[in-house]
DNA sequence: GTCTATATCCAGATAGAC
DNA sequence: GTCTATCTGGATATAGAC
């Protein structure tokens, strides 16, 4: 049940339910053992299946990772969509940034799969990347309202966001040392972005 | 040959040479397969040993990781020590930051083991952590010259540094999108740190 | 779709001879 | 220190019966 699909038959919805169960179990184990340490057999055991049965739902371990990736990004997307735009650049930026870091901290394994890409041979499929890109575009359009449109600006923003998240996760797990820097970081970023010379009048064509 | 040790006997230096060879091979494989995918047996094969022979040098896989961690941090430390202090906070900060990001980019696997800590069950030993702390203290003392002494300030700085490095590695490997933001990031950080109210006059005792 | 059985392969680690 | 042989345990994946 993702996009506009026809009403599922009973069989189809049973299948979807099974897939959800498997994905939930996979995420549980990923949180416990690390994303890279995930084992198909153990996922199967946890949902009460024998390992080969999983192959009715996922063609390979990579396919399972891909589904986990897509599910994670869908969660992320809906969380970011729920952020109310603020009255100023500073406010909007701060809220989106905070939501990003909180999302990361609440599930470091998910953060690792979605944003760090340190899983051995995993490369997201095009379909899954489309969801990731949607999330990125959401940020773009939210900031376009404040005339932030340069790639360089986005890159600076995402660097600060991931830096706060990664430091919090790897150097103070469970704590709040970097969460406490969120407001300052947003102030700092907003100041830097506003200091930036505005583009001249919009012209036709690129550049 | 790390600290002040006596002149090594011939036997000892042979042993050290063997250890260096093993570590070099381990790092090569880590770069190829990812740190988490490292295999003891393959390291052995690569240095022309049978797998059990490795155990004369490292008691376990964890011990090998630990030695790799220590070696990596020693490299990092010497790189940071080679940074000439600048004339201003902005300059010093910028140079250290650039060195950090370049170090990360030139070997993402090393960056992962040293700074991201996403290897399954690996926890550095105390001896190895001491090297890591030495590197951190180096930054602290370099910035103390500019009255940057608050934990919060360091946390903001390290967040920006790791953010640039992590984004460059995971979203533009081999490119320079985030490297190009280094100067701006340093400007931004220096401005934020200087905006910070200075502490009152130094007083005796803690706080 | 689920199972049993199996193929294939690999890992980390230990025992003990040389 | 290095080897052979082995233990133990796991993994992903496939074949084929039900």
Image (cartoon, coloured by chain):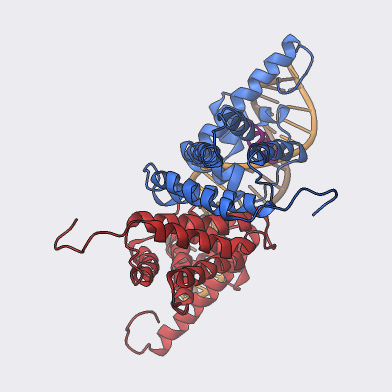
Chain colours: A blue, B red, C brown, D orange
Residue A39 colored in magenta in the image: no
The C terminus of chain B sits in image quarter: bottom left
Q: Is residue A92 left or right of residue B78?
A: right
Look at the picture and state if B105 lies above or below A134. below
Picture residue at 54% right of the left edge, 28% below the top:
A46
> Residue B106 occupies which quadrant of the picture?
bottom right
Q: Is residue A112 left or right of residue A206?
A: left
Toward the front, the furthest residue is: A201
The N terminus of chain B sits in image quarter: bottom left
Look at the picture and state if A107 lies above or below B49. above
Picture residue at 74% right of the left edge, 23% below the top:
A3
In this view of the protein, which residue sits in the foreground, B139 or A205? A205
Look at the picture and state if A127 lies above or below B151. above
Q: Where are the magenta residues, as a range? A: A60-71
In this view of the protein, which residue sits in the foreground, A163 or B182? B182
> Residue A92 occupies which quadrant of the picture?
top right
Locate residue B120, reporting x and y percent: 49, 49
């Amino acid at each position: 049940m993702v996009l506009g699909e026809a009403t599922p038959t009973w069989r189809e919805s049973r299948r979807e339910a099974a897939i959800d169960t498997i994905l939930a179990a996979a995420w549980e184990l990923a949180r416990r053992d690390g994303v890279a340490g995930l084992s198909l057999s153990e996922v199967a055991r946890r949902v009460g299946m024998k390992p080969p049965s999983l192959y009715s739902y996922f063609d390979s371990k990579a396919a399972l990772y891909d589904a986990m990736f897509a599910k994670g990004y869908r969660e992320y997307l809906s969380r970011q969509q729920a952020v109310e735009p603020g009255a100023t650049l500073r406010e909007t930026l701060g809220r989106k940034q905070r939501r990003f870091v909180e999302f990361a901290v609440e599930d470091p394994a998910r953060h690792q799969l979605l944003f760090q890409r340190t899983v051995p041979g995993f490369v997201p499929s095009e379909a899954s990347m489309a969801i990731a890109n949607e999330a990125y575009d959401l940020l773009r359009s939210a900031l376009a309202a404040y005339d932030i449109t340069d790639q360089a600006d986005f890159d600076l923003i995402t660097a600060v966001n991931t830096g706060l998240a990664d430091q919090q996760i790897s150097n103070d797990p469970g704590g709040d040392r970097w969460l406490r820097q969120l407001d300052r970081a947003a102030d700092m970023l907003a100041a830097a972005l506003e200091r930036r010379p505005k583009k001249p009048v919009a012209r036709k064509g690129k550049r």
